[in-house]
Structures are given as structure tokens and as C-alpha cells.
Image (cartoon, rainbow, N blue to C red):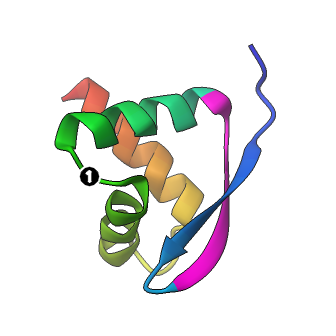
Amino acid sequence: MSTRPIKRSLTLKGHRTSVSLEDEFWQAFREICAEKKKPINVLAAEIDASREADTGLASAIRLYVLRHFRG
């Protein structure tokens, strides 16, 4: 199990951005997307739109994943 973040590109609002998450978070995020039948870019854009201004996108995704599986 690697704890090093893996950088991947996402498209949000028509612009490419890079997000670094640990592989386990990428896997869990993909599982949530499949469950919700939403493309990863769509769910990431929803998370991006609802996050606080002082919260980074990677942190917001991690918190989303955590809350999803705790809920």
C-alpha cells in the first residue's frame, strides 16, 4: 500500500486541473462515482462548487469520500 499521492487531471468548468490523492482515495472516489452513475469530472465539479474557499479540492474530495463511507 502506497501512501504517496498520485496526481491525476480532472476537467472542472471546462478547465483542466490536477488533483493529488492517495490511490486508496482515488479508488474509493471511483466507487462512489459508479454508485451514483456520475462521471468523475461531474462529481468532482459538484464537490468543487460546494467546498469552502479555504479548503483545497484534494482535501474536499478526501472529506467527501470519508463522509460517504461513514454515512
Q: Which residue is mark 1?
A: 38
Judge whether residue 21 is colored magenta.
Answer: yes
Q: Position of residue 51 (x, y in %)?
A: 37, 70
**Could you tell me which residue is drawn at 26 percent across and 52 percent down?**
38
Q: Secondary structure at mark 1?
A: loop
Q: Position of residue 32 (x, y in %)?
A: 31, 36
Is 57 on the left or on the right of 35, as rendered?
A: right
**Could you tell me which residue is drawn at 76 percent across and 26 percent down?**
3
Callout 1 environment at 10 Å: few (<14), some (14 to 19), or many (20+)?
Answer: few
Q: Give above or below for 18 relative to 26.
A: below
Judge whether residue 30 is colored magenta.
Answer: no
Residue 48 in which image quadrant? bottom left
Is 29 on the left or on the right of 70, as rendered?
A: right
**Could you tell me which residue is drawn at 19 percent across and 43 percent down?**
36
Q: Quadrant of the N terminus?
A: top right
**Could you tell me which residue is drawn at 26 percent across and 26 percent down?**
70
Is 21 on the left or on the right of 41, as rendered?
A: right
Q: Main secondary structure of the magenta part?
A: strand
The image shows a total of numbered marks equal to 1
Q: Position of residue 41 (x, y in %)?
A: 42, 63
Give, as a three-letter code, the residue at label 1. Answer: Lys
Q: Quadrant of the C terminus?
A: top left
Q: Give above or below for 18 relative to 14.
A: above
Residue 17 in which image quadrant? bottom right
What's drawn in magenta, residue-wise? 15-23
